[in-house]
Amino acid sequence: MSKDYYKVLGVEKSASEDEIKKAYRQMAHKHHPDKGGGNEAKFKELNEAYQVLGDKQKRSQYDQFGSAGFSGGAGQQQGGFGGGVQWDFSRGGSEGFADIFEDLFGGGFSQKQSQQKQNIGADLKVHITISLEESAFGETKEILISRMMHCDGCNGSGAEPKTELIKCHSCGGKGSHEKFYKTMFGVIKQQGICDDCLGKGSVPKTKCRKCQGNGIQRRNDSFKIKIPQGIDEGDVFKISRKGDDASHGGSSGNLFVAISISSHKLFKRSGDDIKIDLSINFTQAVFGDKIDIDTLYKKIKLKIPEGVQSGKVIKVSGYGMPKKHGFGKGDLLVKVSIKTPENITKQQKKILEELKKEGI
């Protein structure tokens, strides 16, 4: 009798891979036999459904022919639940299952371990401090970091120059090894690259004396980086392949640059806008004026309206920060404060007293 695997997992036929995986995780946790209230038969059924729907090719076959094309239960060998079934996690179709086993049982199938096996150097992070002008206009800066780099004695090979290569004893020249795990599902096979030859099948007969055969050594590296225009405090950007180099010719990691922006004597940034304080005298506030002010780009004349109040913010469009993810600039926001006159003359005092009588 044909089984509705979509119904078993509680998803629609149009469900995405992520939705199917999420549904399986939730239901597998609920019905796991080792948990209180677990249901072994239901767990087996979920397991069978996910073996098909979690694999693109099998799912396509199932959508065409139904579950009849999967005798013995979703690609299993004969033997049933826990009875000598061998599941191969080295194939692409079982990637999701490896993650789920890690989630359910805490086993050795984590993505982090998988990445380590790919022989990729570590990512690095560095903090740099730049000026507000450098963040506005972008800047090319030279930085110096300490990182693992390919050995200059062996060019990263790990072999002493002119030495011959010999077959790796650990894997017998295969470049890979297999591990088998006994679980309640049966025997699980996991395949990975050899730790000693890193998949090459051969190792140098004589290791490089300078790096002890690792192919990498820690050195100082000086290079130029381009600061992106409009970058903000706390932003991080990536420089590809400037992290640690990997041993034996593997791929380099990335460098992540975190930004701090030093304080400015005039301006304060607020998102894409720039704020500035402007102090004017009493008569300028009463009669208005045109005042030269500094911006990030050039001096401009700012029109002060008649009767402006202290604390008023005057917006000057297009004189803020360049926008990081598009064209245009933010605004310049000028906050006005009115200076109280000090050490006034007798004549000025007399005029002010007259204004006071008028209620001004």
Image (cartoon, rainbow, N blue to C red):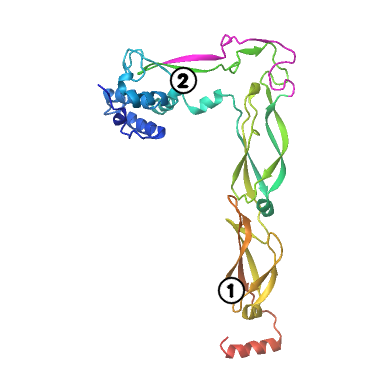
Badge 2 marks a residue whose secondary structure is loop
Quadrant hosting residue 352: bottom right
Using the image, determine if residue 196 lies above or below residue 285. above
Q: Is residue 257 magenta?
A: no
Residue for point 59% across, 10% down? 173
Gap between marks 2 and 1, in whole Å?
71 Å
Give percent across and percent down for residue 123. Answer: 60, 33
| Amino acid type, mark 2 | Arg
Q: Does the image show residue 107? A: no
Q: Residue furthest left?
A: 1
Q: Which residues make up the magenta segment?
A: 152-181
Q: Is residue 111 left or right of residue 316?
A: left
Residue 282, by quadrant, is: bottom right
Mark 1, secondary structure of its residue: loop
User: Which residue type carries mark 1?
Assistant: Ser
In the image, what residue occupies the spot 34% across and 30% down?
29
Q: Are marks 2 and 1 in contact (CB under 8 Å)?
A: no
Which quadrant: the C terminus? bottom right
Q: Which mark is residue 91?
A: 2
Q: Is 198 in front, or is 302?
A: 302
Residue 310 image label: 1
Magenta residue check for 156: yes
Residue 130 at x, y = what percent?
A: 68, 49
